Structures are given as structure tokens and as C-alpha cells.
Amino acid sequence: MANTKSAEKRNRQALKRRARNNTVRTSVKGALKKARETIATKDTAKTGDALKDAIRTLNKAASKGVIHPRNASRRIARLSKAAQATKAAK
């Protein structure tokens, strides 16, 4: 356990940040899952909206430092590629 005042404060800050990061990570996972499911259904109208939402969520998470910017970029690229593949298959 923390022995000094400063260590106790850092611990409190870490707990707050962890909670905030977890909510952002959870929203990212949900948006990605929704986007993947709509891509699988091959409904282009819903896919566009879900993809846009997932991209927005990933960019927000990257800008807040919850995930690395390259990680967000890679996930966006893979989602976009999958969406284009289903669009081209139709």
C-alpha cells in the first residue's frame, strides 16, 4: 500500500483513469462488434452507419490516449476493407 501522501494521490488518480479508460475501451469493443455484425449481414445502409460510428469511437479513443493511434488506424483500415469487400461482392 502507499506510504506517502503523494503515492496515495497517484493511486487515486490511477483508479480514476483506469475507470475512465475501461468505459472508453468497452464502447470501442461494442462499436466494433456492431460494425462487424452489420458487415456480416451485408446490409449496406446499416453497414455505413455502423462503420461511421466505429471509426468515430476509435478516433476518440486514440485521441484520449486509451489506445495507440496506429492501433486505431489499423482497426479502421481492416473494418473499411471488410465493408468494401461485402459491397463489391454484391
Image: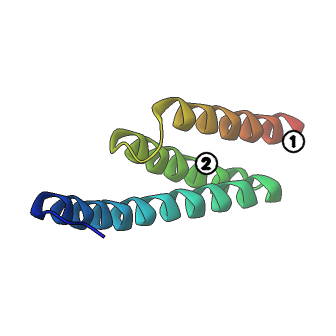
Kind of residue indicated by mark 1 = Lys
By what rule are the colours in the image chosen?
rainbow
Which residue is rendered at x = 75% and y = 56% of the image?
Answer: 43
For disc 1, the neighbor class at 10 Å (few under 14, some 14 to 19, many from 20) is few
Residue bearing mark 2: 48
Cα distance in 3D space between marks 1 and 2: 15 Å
As helix, strand or loop, the secondary structure at mark 1 comes to loop
Residue sitting nearer the eye, 63 or 9: 9
Residue 24 rendering spot, x and y as whole percentages: 42, 59
* Left or right: 68 in relation to 39: left
Residue 86 rendering spot, x and y as whole percentages: 82, 42
Tell me which numbered mark, 1 or 2, is placed earlier along the sequence. 2
* Left or right: 15 in relation to 41: left
Toward the right, the furthest residue is 89
* Closer to the eye: label 1 or 2: 2
Examine the image and state in which quarter residue 34 appears: bottom right
Q: Is residue 64 above or below residue 34?
A: above
Residue bearing mark 1: 90
Kind of residue indicated by mark 2 = Gly
Which residue is rendered at x = 61% and y = 48% of the image?
Answer: 48
Residue 59 rendering spot, x and y as whole percentages: 43, 41
Examine the image and state in which quarter residue 46 appears: bottom right
As helix, strand or loop, the secondary structure at mark 2 comes to helix
Residue sitting nearer the eye, 57 or 20: 20
* Left or right: 36 in relation to 74: right
Q: Is residue 52 above or below residue 18?
A: above
* Left or right: 72 in relation to 82: left
Q: Quadrant of the N terminus?
A: bottom left
